[in-house]
Image (tube, coloured by chain):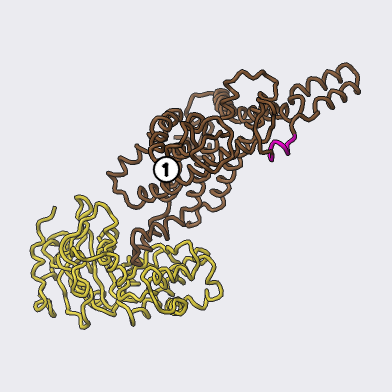
Amino acid sequence: MSDSYSTTDETTDSEAANSTDTGTEARRPGETLDETTPSIQEIPERETVIEATDLTVHYGDVEALKPVNVRLPEQEVTAIIGPSGCGKSTFLRCINRMNDMVDAARVGGELRYRGTNVYGDEVDPVALRRRIGMVFQKPNPFPKSIYDNVAYGLKIQGYDGDIDARVEESLRNAALWDEVKNQLDSSGLDLSGGQQQRLCIARAIAPDPEVILMDEPASALDPVATAKVEDLIDELAEEYTVIIVTHNMQQAARISDKTAVFLTGGKLVEFGDTNRIFENPENQRVEDYITGKFG
Amino acid sequence: MSDATEGADLSRAGSDIPAGKNLAVRGVFFACALVTVLTTFGIVVVLVDGALGFFREETLFELLASVGAGILAGSPTEALEALRSGLAARVTVTEFLFGTEWSPIIRPRSYGILPLVWGTMIIVVGSALIALPVGTATAIYLSEYADRRVRKVIKPTLEILAGIPTIVYGFFALSFITPLIQRFFPETGTFNAAAGAIVVGIMIIPMVSSLSEDAMSAVPDDLRNAAYGLGATKFEVSTDVVFPASLSGVIASYILAISRAIGETMAVTLAVGMQPNVTLNPLEPAQTMTAYMVQIGISDVSVGSIGYQSLFAVGLLLFAMTLAMNLLSLQIKGRYQEEYQ
């Protein structure tokens, strides 16, 4: 197990501000990576929703996530990119404790949601997940009607308003209403893949969460459906904090405000404004990855 | 290296088994597969043959023989006469199915099978009341709640439960369950329907739980994650998502378990007794269709007598019931399978 992440302690609030002296300019791939501090490059102008402090994940003896220190801003789209197996989905699943479902997963460090450590003893993951919606890689509507799919979250969360109205609103926000308004009683599985994914997005936003996690939400879709989902994510960011994992760098560049780059080994290597990351990454490996030299 | 122009030699796979031997192997396998088909066919023929001897004067084969003799003798009238006398009614189907008195051996005789069907139904309903809820809950526990270590203990235990000979269950009912019931209801007889229903219920729990758990485990994790991601509790995931998605498999398991309860023999013969009885009181003795067949099978009724032939009539009805159940189960499984794909 790696013993070389003690340097990550330096990322305190003040010195992270505008820090450009992390000394990454001359590093070559594979050389001194462990010293590269996954530092917070800029203080987000917006308020922090998710803050990870030395967050680690082990699957059994395998270290899936090296200590991550990052703060994700509210009402922005944060893209998490990186090659396969880099831990980006693992990080995402830490946020709403979906890793709890994996028997062998052990989480270390802290992950704060609005200041509360979600791995604290008093935290009920069910309550957490009601604040943080999730959309998955493969469209996974329930084998129920379109209406029931969207209404399910409202029902289990004891929503006491007008469910019909909320279902319609969610479907509208997911840009699906016009396509399904006359078939709300037919099965969600009868829809096309792209429609199913938008249905899943409607389902996720119906209970009005604050944060929406998306795990490669367009990777199973064709280009047209992908474009629709991307437009949708853009709109969602007006109301919600969106954190999206994607292996598609163009997608990340198109839709995100902030980008976090994980590289092989489960290490968060760079985080910052998307434009800056794509135009002028500090880390050589990130540049190599973004320009397609590996990954 | 062969020349490209010659083409690759694909005539032999390199194995030295001659083609004839392959054919022979295929034939042997086919014969083995045929055994089950022929056996099923044979059983149906025997049941129909014997049952005809219950409803008519002659069994199917007797009838064929006597009519055949007439034809061979060149006398169509003789053959017709044989057919007529052979088909003379003994017991009408109406009496058999709708009569309420069952006494094929002891005079005054009557042949209404209702008391036996009733006995079977008491056991089926009683055992289902136990096995379906307990089996379903067990399946949900194993599929959704149990961690690997607990599952490692419970699953083999259930398999052991399923492997216990049914006669042992019968002894268990007689020597443990009935005395237990008697402690609370002293008027309970040595033979009673309740003990039989309980013991059959326990017996079929593994069928329900293991087949249902297979169906539940086959529900994709994607669906569970979707619900968990919305803030569903484990209970909500189990009842709102996993159970409905696996419903076809669960119902198929119910039907197979019920079918097994219908056909269950030794345990109910021992526990419930041999007294045809139409009663709602589970503390009274009764007799199931299967127990009646045991009774006749080991008794000294003479071959060809109405009592002996009744064995086949009851057997045929029993077969029809379990067959219907199994077909229904296949139907349900086929129709609703993979709905979530």
Point 58% across, 46% down: residue: B328
Q: What is the magenta range?
A: B92-98
Q: How many marks?
A: 1
Res. A82 visible in picture = no
Residue position for label 1? B210
Please state the horizontal and vertical placement of residue B43, each as a whole percent of the image: 63, 28
Classify 10 Å Cα crowding around label 1: few (below 14), some (14-19), many (20 and above). Answer: many
Question: For this view, does B340 lie left or right of residue B48?
Answer: left
Name the quarter where the C terminus of chain A is drawn.
bottom left
Instruction: Answer with left or right where residue B83 lies relative to residue B36.
Output: right
What residue is drawn where x is 9% and y is 67%?
A9
In x, y percent, where is residue B205?
A: 43, 41
Helix, strand or loop at disc 1?
Answer: helix
Q: Colour of chain B?
A: brown
**Which color is chain A depicted in?**
yellow
The quarter of the displayed image where residue B311 is located:
top right
Which residue is pictured at 47% across the width and 75% down the height? Answer: A176
Compared across the picture, whether B174 is left or right of B325 comes to left
Q: Please, what is the three-letter code of the amino acid marked with disc 1? A: Ser
Using the image, determine if residue B321 lies above or below residue B15.
Answer: below
**Residue B239 in view, yes or no:** yes
| B110 with respect to A198 (left or right) | right
Residue B266 position in % (x across, y down): 50, 29
Image quadrant assignment for residue B79:
top right
Q: What's the chain of the residue with tag 1?
A: B
Residue B276: x, y in percent?
Answer: 59, 33
